[in-house]
Amino acid sequence: MSGFKAREATLQNLFDSGDYDQFVIPHYQRSYVWGQDELENFWNDFIERKEVGQLYLLGSIIVSRTKQKRSFGVVDGQQRLITSSVFITALKDVWSEKFGRDEEYFSLERFIKKRVLGSNSAIFKIDVAGSLKQCYIDMIISGSTKKEYKNEDQKNLHRAYNYFKDKLRDSYDANQANDNQRKKLLLQKLENLLDTNLVLVILDDEDDAYEVFEGFNARGVDLSISDLFKNLFLQKIKGTEEEKTRALEEWDNIIQIVTELRIPKFTINTFIRYYWIRNHSFIGERQLYKKIKKETKNYRELLSDMHQIAEALRVLFNGSPYEIRDFLGHPEAKAEYAKSISDSLRALRVMNTQSYMVWLMSIAAKRNKEFISLKMFARSLGQIERFSFRYFVVSKLPANRVEKMYAKFSNELFKLSDIRDKQRIATLLDKGILDRIEQDKLLPPREQFIADFGLLCLKPNNNKNLVRYILTQIENQLSSGEKGVTQEVVTIEHIMPQRLNKGWNISQTDHKNCVNMLGNLTILKGASNSSASNKAINEKIRHFKDSDLKMNGDLVDLINKKSDWGKDEIIERQNAFAEASDGIWSVDKR
């Protein structure tokens, strides 16, 4: 590494000094991520300053020289610098709101134009990159918060702006003095921030910035694998600034796609790891960055491949059956297979599991119709849906062993890349998952599954879509699929209500233990009948009699047979569901 210089300064020195025309937030930096906790600490430590006489230190701001004179790339400190600009802008706008555009307001505006915007309105003192740029410009120039921004960093920026406006308004309202005293209060808060001490570290070589950024991870600074990977590919992809900008836009698009998939616990970090282990050795997230850095030769190609797989996932999860069919290269295939794929993926999404994504990403990479038929894909995905239900939802077993199983499958699939391997791929998809489940002894025995199902308790408020999925599957099995019911047209109903009234003869303990058991839940077509929800069972039974669902016909028969509805009846019904469910979610079912 080349040399560096360090000097003590204040935030005002950074804004005022002619030595620093601009601080540029480079592409490799993470987005604006500060939330409520960080903003509160910033307010208390640097603006409110409740401890008189204490030295307030903003920490170190590390920058690197760039090819432009008096322009510096920010290596560490971007969150603090952006937040400072946000606060100053919020103060100006609150001033206008409370005092109008008086002489002091225009002084503040001139201050912002000179020290936040920079020497002219075309050059921002703090220049942000990527998707945050236009949002930042809108806020600094006009205080605009009316636009609907999709990206989380943009939302965070507006939350910060509104947070400071609310805090400043509260300070104004709490001060019962005259306007002059209130103005002094607001100006004191600005002075507090600008007088905050910091250490400015200037690296002589721009290339050292990547190394220093990476070094933060070794010192325990909270950098995720996605932060480090972004830094790495921007360092390794050689080319013009325009080419790096295109690479960054591709990366931002990957993040947006992964976020919009809405798969529980499937983050961008999980995406990177699963992408890697599908055709490399199985490793945890801690070892991932070193492996990628050591084994990757072409980062442009790696990023492009990641983007293609992300796009494939977007279509598979969010596309219609016809879009799925066309995307997979089978426009002539039966739409029922594409619908089966869509239904299985929707089911897996509500199961709160993501291990299968290793498998799915490997299939997405092999989506050429010459290798995988739509029917083959749908059948294999159905096996995974049913296995995941037994393993995760009912028996609640750990994910690590399943991740390893999917990674082994994906590694084997990756090696089959020639058209002559088509039959081997077909065999692997047809029996590969089942064989590995059996070899690794992952499937809980039938007796354990039925016992675990008998104890299954799901609060509909927290698991609404999962409960709908289970009960519609059971209903369609009980009715032999004659009428068929879909999740979209049903509502969940508690048989014994969530809140007991005098018409129910059951202990508080039994009520607590049984109220959210599946045996106490049913589905009804159309809107929920809230007027009947807390009625006694002899009144509620009328609503179940009106239902054409087989599940509710059986429920009415059970209530009439027992002349009651309590703990024993709920357990009996749930055990009947368990017996039926063993067939519904049979993994090797065709």
Image (tube, rainbow, N blue to C red):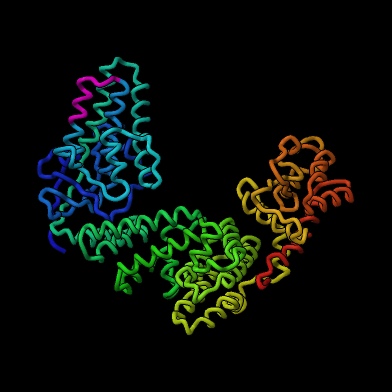
Q: Position of residue 333 (x, y in %)?
A: 57, 68
Specify whether residue 106 is painted magenta.
yes
- Viewer-closest of 152 and 326: 326
Instruction: Find residue 247 and report its image quarter.
Output: bottom left
Q: Position of residue 488 (x, y in %)?
A: 64, 49
Instruction: Find residue 578 and report its image quarter.
Output: bottom right
> Which stretch appears magenta?
99-110
Res 364 visible: yes
Specify whether residue 3 is painted magenta.
no
Image point (71%, 52%), residue name: 517
Number of labels in the image equals 0
Q: Position of residue 73 (x, y in %)?
A: 20, 52
Task: Please give left or right for residue 95 compared with residue 68 in the image.
Answer: right
Q: Is residue 230 above or below residue 425?
A: above
Q: Is residue 492 above or below residue 209?
A: above
Res 10 visible: no
Q: Is residue 528 above or below residue 567?
A: above
- Viewer-closest of 204 and 304: 304
